[in-house]
Amino acid sequence: MELSSPNWVIDSDLVCFSPSVHAAVIAINEAVDSGRVEVTVEALKNPNALLTDLQEALMSVYQEMLHQTASRRLGYTQFITPCFRS
C-alpha cells in the first residue's frame, strides 16, 4: 500500500508520529475514499488517530469536508497536527 496517495486527505508522511498513528491516518484516508460515513466515523474515533472533541452530530459533515478536500488533493495535515514535516 502506498502511504502517500495523491488523493488522500491526510498525509501519513510525518516523522513525529508513531506507527499506530500512521495506521490510523491510513484508515481515515481509506474510510474517506470509501464514501461511507459509518466507516469514516469508526476511523475518526480510533484512539490512535489522536482526534478529540469529535461531535456526533457533525459526522456526515466531517465525511463531506474530508471527501471534498481529498477531491481537490489538498494536504490536510497542516490543519490537524502540531508537528512539522522534516
Image: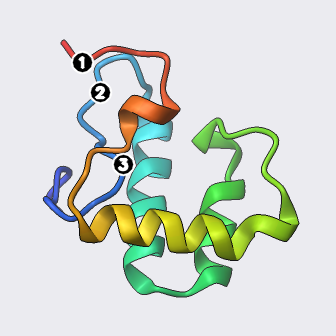
Quadrant the C terminus occupies: top left
Q: Which residue is mark 1?
A: 85
Q: Is residue 61 left or right of residue 27?
A: right
Q: Mark 3 or 1 closer to N-term? A: 3
CA neighbours of label 1 inside 10 A, class few (<14), some (14 to 19), many (20+):
few
Q: Is residue 11 above or below residue 84?
A: below
SS class of the residue under badge 2?
loop
Mark 3 vs mark 2: give the one in front. 3
Q: Residue 33 appears in which quarter of the rendering?
A: bottom left
> Mark 2 belongs to which amino acid?
Leu
Q: Position of residue 41 (x, y in %)?
A: 68, 69
Give me the residue at 48% from left, 73% from top: 31
Of residues 67 and 86, the one nearer the viewer is 67
Give me the residue at 67% from left, 53% from top: 46
Q: Which residue is mark 2?
A: 14
Q: Position of residue 42 (x, y in %)?
A: 68, 68
Find out whether the residues at labels 1 and 2 contact each other: C-beta distance under 8 Å.
yes
Of residues 63 and 19, the one nearer the viewer is 63
Q: Residue 5 appears in which quarter of the rendering?
A: bottom left
Q: How many discs mark residues in the rendered view?
A: 3
CA neighbours of label 2 inside 10 A, class few (<14), some (14 to 19), many (20+):
some
Quadrant the N terminus occupies: bottom left
Question: Whole-Å distance between the Cαs marked 1 and 2?
Answer: 6 Å
Disc number at residue 19? Answer: none
Mark 1 vs mark 2: give the one in front. 1
Q: Which residue is mark 3?
A: 10
